[in-house]
Amino acid sequence: MPQVAVVTGGSSGIGAAVARALTARGWHCVLIARGEERLRRLAEELGVEWEACDVGVREAVDRVASKIVERHPAIRLLVNNAGVPGRGTFLSLPPERIEAVTQTNYLGGVWCLRAFLPALEAAAPADLVNVVSVAGTVAAGSGGPYSASKHAQLAFSRSARSELRERGIRVHTVLPGFVETEGFPQRSRFSNRLVRGVVVEPELVAERIIGAIERDRAEVFVPRWYRLAPYAQALVPSLVARLGKRGIRPAGD
């Protein structure tokens, strides 16, 4: 029997790339996302299962997880990848958007872990991957709510690694920089040529996720040199602030 993986945010971008990489390696995937039509098309293409769900809504996660666990009592891998962008500041974004960013990017992973924990324990040794962001290690005014949600997600992921080890569940934190996906910064949206050059493809992130699982890596930055970002924030915060204000400004804004 193939090993079972649940991938949230699985209809496009990093989630879709992870699903493709896993199925190519013989895994059976269950994809979760909000966009039902796109999710269904990808699931049919890959021959996998799918469930439409907004992971930021705890009751919805519990309901969908119950259905999945009934079909698959032992789940070997959970990839918490679902996320929503939050371009704007704490003062410019509507309160509803700030709530959505926090609920999806941070609490969504918490709700999914709690809901799928019995199935992960049943499959132990099992793995949990939290796709965070380098934005969870630095902060700039132009994307405060998004960055704050990723800081919270990073703290959750680090805490979970310590908490779940004794349960036979290994936790891996993957921190991409700019990735060429819908809804998040793309090369064509940037006015700064240097920043456009550091955007990576979702397939690279997917490969690093699988590498983190295979090597039991606690934290992986994509690209690797992004691990310097927190040091830059501490040593030269004014530089990070300028890059946040200028370098990642979408072209035409």
Image: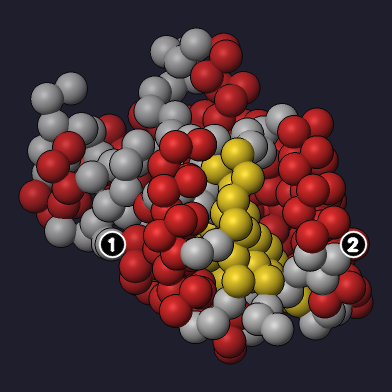
Q: In which quarter of the image is residue 207?
A: bottom left
Of the two numbered discs 1 and 2 in the rendering, the one whose residue sits closer to the viewer: 2
Q: Which mark is residue 221?
A: none
The x and y percentages for residue 206 are: 43, 69
Residue wearing tag 2: 118
The x and y percentages for residue 63 are: 80, 38
Q: Quadrant of residue 53?
A: top right
**Crowdedness of circle 1 by 10 Å Cα count: few (<14), some, many (20+)?**
some
Q: Taking the image as drawn, is residue 236 in sight?
A: no
Residue at the far bottom in the pictured view: 215
Q: Is mark 2 on a helix, strand or loop?
A: helix
Quarter of the figure that contains the N terminus: bottom right
Q: Is residue 32 above or below residue 253?
A: below
**Crowdedness of circle 2 by 10 Å Cα count: few (<14), some, many (20+)?**
some
Q: In this view, does 141 lie above or below 82?
A: above
Asked if disc 1 and disc 2 are in contact, CB closer than 8 Å, the reply is no
The x and y percentages for residue 2 are: 65, 81
Q: In this view, does 214 lie above or below 41?
A: below
| Residue 84 located left or right of residue 200 | right
| Residue 92 located left or right of residue 197 | right
Name the residue located 80 percent from the left edge and 31 percent from the top edge.
Answer: 59
In terms of sequence position, does the residue under pointer 1 or pointer 2 come before the other?
A: 2
Q: Taking the image as drawn, is residue 187 in sight?
A: yes
Name the residue located 44 percent from the left edge and 29 percent from the top edge.
Answer: 86
Name the residue located 17 percent from the left edge and 37 percent from the top edge.
Answer: 189
Name the residue located 27 percent from the left edge and 52 percent from the top edge.
Answer: 180
Amino acid type assigned to the residue bearing label 2 in the image: Pro
Q: Is mark 1 on a helix, strand or loop?
A: loop
Amino acid type assigned to the residue bearing label 1 in the image: Glu
| Residue 29 located left or right of residue 246 | right
Residue wearing tag 1: 201
